Image: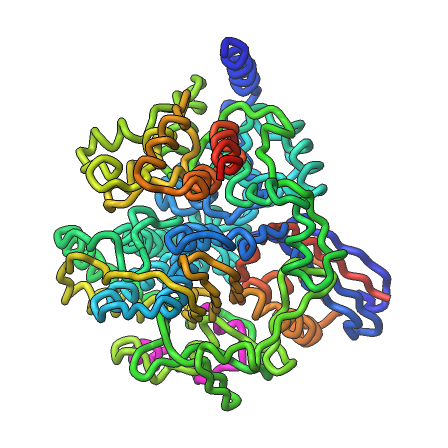
Amino acid sequence: MAGQNRNQTDALDRLNDRSNPRPRIAVHKFSSCDGCQLAFINAGEALLELAQLVDIVHFAEAGPMDPEAAVDLAFVEGSISTPDEAERIRKVRASSRYLVSLGACATSGGLQALRNFNDDGAKGWTEAIYAQPAFIDSLDTATPVAEHVKVDLELWGCPVNARQVFQALRQLLFGVAPVVDKDKLCVECKRQQHVCVLVAKGEPCMGPVTHTGCGALCPAFGRDCYACFGPAENPNTAALARRFEGLGLMPEAVARRFHFINSHAPAFRSEWLAWKQGS
Amino acid sequence: MSENREIRIEVPVLARVEGEGALELSASGGQIETLRLRIFEPPRYFEKFLEGRGHQEVLDVVARICGICPVAYQMTAVQALEQAFGVQASPWVIRMRRLMYCGEWLQSHALHIHLLALPDFLGFESGIAMAARHPEAVRRGLRLQRLGNDLIRLFGGRSVHPVGMRVGGFHRAPDPERAATLLEEMRAALPDAEDLVAFTASLDLPQDDQDFTSVSLRHESEYPLYSGRIVSDRGLDLAVEDYPKHFQESHVAHSTALYAHLDGEPYLVGPLARLNLNHDRLSPPARAALDATGLQLPSRNMFHSVIARAVEIHEVVLEAIRLLESYRPEEPAHVPVTVGAGTGFGATEAPRGLLWHRYELDAAGKVRSAQIVPPTSQNQARIEDDLKRSLEAFGLHNDDDALRLRGETVIRNYDPCISCATHFLKVRIQRR
């Protein structure tokens, strides 16, 4: 933990050491749905304001195009799923002072990391979908950015939201380390005074082990959280899984709750394995 | 400039599209010999993730195919799942789905017109750069985009990967006070939407008529969004489940997106195809604003797709006002669902065009197999066809930068959602 803080400080020092007060930023895309970049593109006036505060030197979907430019701050969306991407992320890291992984794909591998657990890798799936599998150049796994290069700040969420991204960005522009709330979703849900869907309705809600940040949307709709923001800090996944079994879920269904949007995140991966083997 | 010199241009990334693509062409003696739109979207294997998943999981999975049109994927899947289970959604649910879908069209079209397409026609690198010179046009676009996102949020909690839909209806009906606030905002936005139609029609758009087949849904009384039969302007008229009888997907070496053909030929889906086939279904005010532009329909000029998008923005703002005016919550917001084995089909009009799904479910209601045909793979063959013809019409004597910009502009007419892809557009031109 101390080491992690130390690393964060080093990265922040590098960011604050820049010669130009106006930071240069880049938004890079890897394997993803483009949904996390929309935190910027959907920001409306805030996007125009941001363009006054920083130089956006690379952001393909928004227009600026200079993927190899040296930048102070890089936001990376998407997981690493092709040989080309594995090479490209190293270049992005080398040219960025501070690197932020933006959303579930970049931070945990995302939904497409489900391929990582297929018995014969992605190959069997390629053969099932594509008539000519030899044309497809894809890695067997879709992995988080941090498995390839050092990440200075992780922003969880499928998708991340504008508040989360702009809060971190604002703190970085002030030169301080961003504070990320790693609490469980339940805390936010209680604060909003929603009826607990786990206790009151017996739904297999993932809130007790899920990273806060979405605004407790699913419980607000009366449905169970499906953990799109990934595991919270120190999640007691084993206790929650046993509770799901107590609600009447078959072991296979318990396993599937952890084997979804953030299947590659260690806390969820181990719980999935425990129940998959038991099923 | 010589048309015969050998030259090679590489643009590392195609800007202002959703996803990664590349364009390669070789030309000789002023004629294009080969032209390929390459799509590098890393395969994400959605159809395989869906196998073994329950029905609520399906809606949460398919949303993640595309961050810009998640509602389209959820709407199409929910239709197919309900058909497979023999569930009939209530008329209220169908109206509310149409209303929510209006939000997605509004945000997606406003984003495309203002941040992706307009910089081409006004001569800027990006919408952000354009904002300094055309602040009002950009702000109008951002207002419309936000309003579309707010409408999705009303039903789904968030505009990207919303959480409110379920088989049988919605998890919860929107709060009437929030719906009333949104109604006021929609009414206030109506002048923006009307102005946008006239504004796009006043742009100095290239004239380049081409022969192509338009395909879209057609509804008995409404402008097509959530449902209809599949029709073309060459006499095709199909029930949704008969799509595979005439449309085939194939795989080529240079693309991770499958190509779809209609009886072996390229075809167009999306706003211009929809408008060509359904302009008689527009509401009277949208029709009047369109008529005032003097645009002749059907149009054979793909550059008119920016006008078609504006007309559709106007139509969905009007439609959202109409549906919000009569809004009453209904609880529960869904009909009961009994799962069972079956096969179901869904087809809706995503912002970028026809989206088709098929699911086969087992007795426990879990997915046995899934097939998804997104709009961009349907347009891929047409885009290549268009590029070849429009670049020749533009003239290969133009310098490489001008050719590249024209090529990119042509591609952006289709608003390709390659994310449903990734984004390396390398333009490689070889002149021999």
* Relative image position of residue B255 (x, y in whole percent): 68, 60
Q: Give the range drawn in magenta.
A: B287-306
Residue B288 included in the magenta stretch of the image? yes
Name the image colouring.
rainbow
Question: Which quadrant holds the N terminus of chain B?
Answer: bottom right
Residue A59, position in %: x, y? 54, 43
Which residue lies at the image location 30% right of the left edge and 68% below the top edge? B87
- Placement of B409 over or under B386, stated as above or below: above
In the rendered image, the vertical position of residue B268 relative to residue A273, given as above or below:
below
Q: Quadrant of the C terminus of chain B?
A: bottom right
From where the camera sits, is residue B109 visible?
no
Which residue is the extreme one toward the front? A278
Front residue of this view, candidates B136 and B29: B29
| Left or right side of B138 for B42 | right
Say which residue appears at 86% left-offset and 63% top-offset. Answer: B5
- Visible residue check, residue A120: yes
In percent of width and height, residue A206 lies at: 35, 35
Assess whether residue A275 is covered by the magenta stretch: no
**Quadrant in which residue B249 is drawn:** bottom right
Q: Residue furthest top?
A: A2
- Image quadrant assignment for residue A156: top left
Q: Which of B142 and B51 is in front in this view?
A: B51
